[in-house]
Amino acid sequence: MRMTEKYDAQSDGWSERAYADSASYLAHRAETIQRLGPELREGDILLDLACGDGGLADFLPAWLSYSGVDASEAMVAAARASGRDVVRGDLNDYVPPQQVAATTCFRAIYYARERRAFFALARSYTERKLVFDLNPRQYGLDDVGADLRAAGFEHLDVRPFFAPQRIRVPAPGLGVLHRLEGMDALARLLLRFRFTYVCAAS
């Protein structure tokens, strides 16, 4: 079975079904992308790798130009049906037609055939920052940082991302989780059991 076949089958309503509360999850992702690392400015292009149906686009500010890439033909079709600018491509070798201010890659860094090579490719067309999520129970921050430096990135900003994917949490509970992201000791403790980091390499 091709890797994309399971995503082809799930393309209808992907963003709504992939998260228990897709609106709050994707809104928090969009906010984190903007505030972590170098600032984004009006007219900047954001390239979203392995974007699925491009649901993130709906939560980014209108002044930011969104472009998505996904390996699944069905996901690309679903994205375009929703009016989102998405093309088919593999994050391991896709190169956009022009430089972009920011590149994002969420829930997909493990699809990189060789992580350092992927970082180097992204660095070649990304002017300001590469933003991606990282499971610290699966990948070491020091190892990832070394690969980023080898690829030409000089700085790495990291922030915990406490947004439940499979459980819908009432707004007050989400507020508590989001505040915990800034509490270093408690955040590190929680990350030992679940959730991820968002990393911005620049």
Image (cartoon, rainbow, N blue to C red):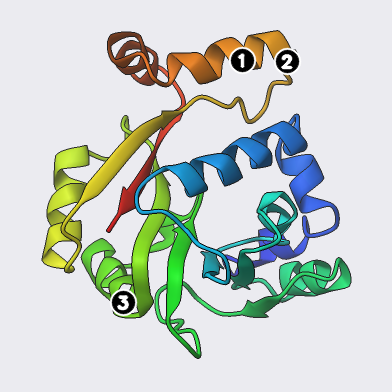
Which of the pair 161/139 is nearer the observer? Answer: 161
Circle 3 is placed at which residue position?
121
Q: Amino acid at mark 1?
A: Gly
The answer to which quarter of the image holds residue 48 is bottom right
Image quadrant in which the N terminus is located: bottom right
Image disc number at residue 84: none
Q: Position of residue 81 (x, y in %)?
A: 88, 71
For label 1, the SS is helix
Q: Residue at x 56, y 63 (%)?
A: 50
Mark 3 in CB contact with mark 1 (< 8 angstroms): no
Please tell me whether residue 149 is drawn above or below residue 189 in the rendered image. below
Please tell me whether residue 135 is drawn above or below residue 107 in the rendered image. above
Q: Position of residue 58 (x, y in %)?
A: 75, 54
Q: Amino acid at mark 2?
A: Ala
Q: Residue at x 50, y 51 (%)?
A: 106
Callout 2 crowding tier (Cα within 10 Å): few <14, some 14–19, many ≥20: few
Callout 1 crowding tier (Cα within 10 Å): few <14, some 14–19, many ≥20: few
Answer whether residue 176 is visible to the viewer in this image: yes
